[in-house]
Image (spheres, grey):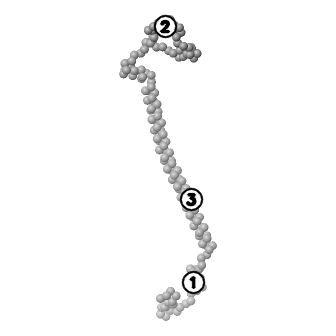
Amino acid sequence: MSPRAPRPSPAGAVRRRPSFTQRQETARFHRDRDRRRLRAMARGLLSASLLVVLVLGLVGLRVQQVRLSYRLDRLRAVKAELEEARSRLRVELATLTSLARIESKARGELGMVRPGSNQVRLAREFVPGGGGDQAMAPLTAAALSPTDAQPGAR
């Protein structure tokens, strides 16, 4: 049976013509597309998709911000650990370079003794009252005092 062929009606039924409103409703399904409605739907769809893209962009930025926040927290923890290690190393350096420790190591492990007073000579530039111009003067036997000029006395 073709779709346009008249359908057989039940026995004894009278075929009525559809009313005006029924014909309008049927015609509604066969109407040409309304371009204004189509444009409005396209604008609505475009606006909704733009809104979705903006929201997803904001969510992406927030996720990136949270990731960076976690990374910053980790870096701050590492920085605190490094500062603590640096502080410990400075204390260790100060301990290892202390003169008292060096002197005790020299005496204990190397067998060194404290020098006598006649074994120590100070350079002129480091003696109080000794100027830089005196440091430039040549060190000769005439410049030494008679007690210093004795051979073998250092």
Tell me if I can see residue 128 in this picture: no
Instruction: In this rendered view, identify the residue nearer to me: 77 or 115.
Output: 115
Q: Amino acid at mark 3?
A: Leu
Under mark 2, the amino acid is Ala
The reply to whether discs 1 and 3 touch (Cβ–Cβ < 8 Å) is no
Badge number at residue 53 = none
Q: Which of the two residues, 141 or 31, is positioned nearer the viewer here? A: 141
Choose mark 1 or mark 3, whichever is in front. 3
Comparing labels 3 and 2, the label whose residue is closer to the camera: 2
Q: Secondary structure at mark 3?
A: helix
The answer to whether the residue labelled 3 contacts the one labelled 2, judged by CB atoms less than 8 Å apart, is: no
Which residue is tagged 2? 149
Dividing the picture into quarters, in which one does residue 26 lie? bottom right
Mark closer to the chain start, 2 or 1: 1
Give the image location of residue 96, x and y in percent: 43, 27
Label 1: which secondary element:
helix
Q: Quadrant of residue 23?
A: bottom right
Q: Residues within 10 Å of mark 2 (few under 14, many from 20)?
A: some
Q: Amino acid at mark 1?
A: Gln
Which of marks 3 and 1 precedes in the sequence?
1
Q: Which residue is mark 3?
A: 54
Q: How packed is label 3: few (under 14 Cα within 10 Å), some, or many (20 or more)?
A: few
- Percent of width and height locating residue 72: 50, 45
From this viewpoint, is residue 5 visible?
Answer: yes
Mark 1 lies on residue: 22
- Extreme residue toward the right, this view: 36
Residue at left 46%, top 27%? 94
